[in-house]
Image: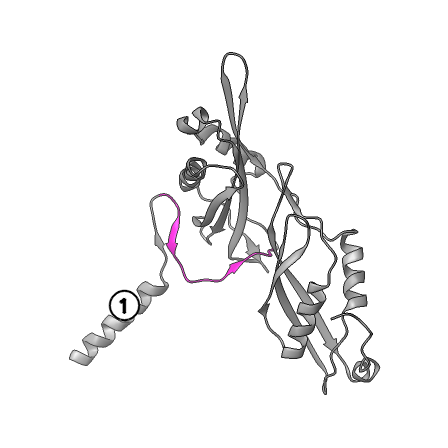
Amino acid sequence: MKAVVNLLMLVIYLLLLVSPIYSQDNTVQHIDHKVYLKLDTFPVFNEGKEELSEYISKNAIYPKQSIDKNDTGVVKAELIIEKNGCITIDSIFSLGKASPALVKEVIRIVKTMPKWMPGKKKGEVVRSKIYIYIKFSIKQNKTRKTTNIYVVYSNEASFVGGEAAYLLYLQESIIMPKFDRDTIGTVFIKCLIKKDGSIDSITVVKEFIDIFNKEAAEVVSRMPKWYPANVAGENIETWLYIPIKFTIQGSDCKKKEKRKNRKR
């Protein structure tokens, strides 16, 4: 009987570990599922971007102490949209000069948001990560201050010359490592595009085979500067996930044994 009770308690404990715990403000405290960045259908707030901007403008409150101190700036909210549309706050922080009071207000407004329409991948509803940038601004005239809080949209980091130049760079720069059998695989590289467009903090986040992992990391490390991401006219640092696909066939092994001369 004691063994049965212990087994039952273990099952209950495991269920608690993987079950979502929802709060009254539509945020999720814990749930055990993968989060996707690349989706076929992205999460939507009500009917779209205009609705989100209107919600922020109507419901956000400019802190009085921030008005008195002329605090302005952009706050970034990194949010996870759960399968049921609830919100998990992953991280909310200042981009530059926005004060802690402004960050606190963004946290508050996010917690009041209604459910989103969740994202989809391959036809299935999934957890997904989104980024929202909220700008606080103050205009001063002779008699009073006018405040404004609104959503700003970013220009993502991009390869100089566009997608065609990016694909050409990969085609010319990747040299297939010598391998004794046919194989196909993809290495995913995480890297930081800095404010000046340079690449830093290169990490292999999804491995294939060691020699291919190293080749993928080297190819990314030798990339020229990118156009950095930009929010409200200011360059910002941003993380990228770059897939590098390798296809080795028998004939390729012989053709590409001799590597091109290049600086390592």
Q: Is residue 75 left or right of residue 210?
A: left
30 is within the stretch colored magenta: yes
Q: What colouring style does the render use?
A: one colour
Residue 213 x %, y % = 64, 73
Q: Nearer the viewer, residue 206 or 140?
A: 140
Q: Residue furthest top?
A: 143
- Disc 1 secondary structure class: helix
Q: Position of residue 177 (x, y in %)?
A: 73, 79
Q: In terms of image quadrants, where is residue 155?
A: top right
Q: Is residue 144 magenta?
A: no
Q: Is residue 92 left or right of residue 141?
A: left
Relative depth, front residue between 4 and 110: 110
* Residue at the farthest front position: 263
Q: Residue furthest bottom?
A: 180
- Amino acid type indicated by mark 1: Ile
| Quadrant location, the N terminus | bottom left
The 10 Å Cα crowd at callout 1, few under 14, some 14 to 19, many 20 or more, is few
One can see residue 189 in this view: yes
Q: Residue 99 placed where, x, y %?
A: 46, 37
Q: Relative to 200, say whether 209 is above or below.
A: below
Q: Residue at x 40, y 28 (%)?
A: 65
The quarter of the rendered structure image containing the C terminus is: bottom right
Write the start and end of the magenta stretch as one range: 25-39
Residue of label 1: 12
Residue under the point 45% across and 25% down? 67
Q: Is residue 1 visible?
A: no
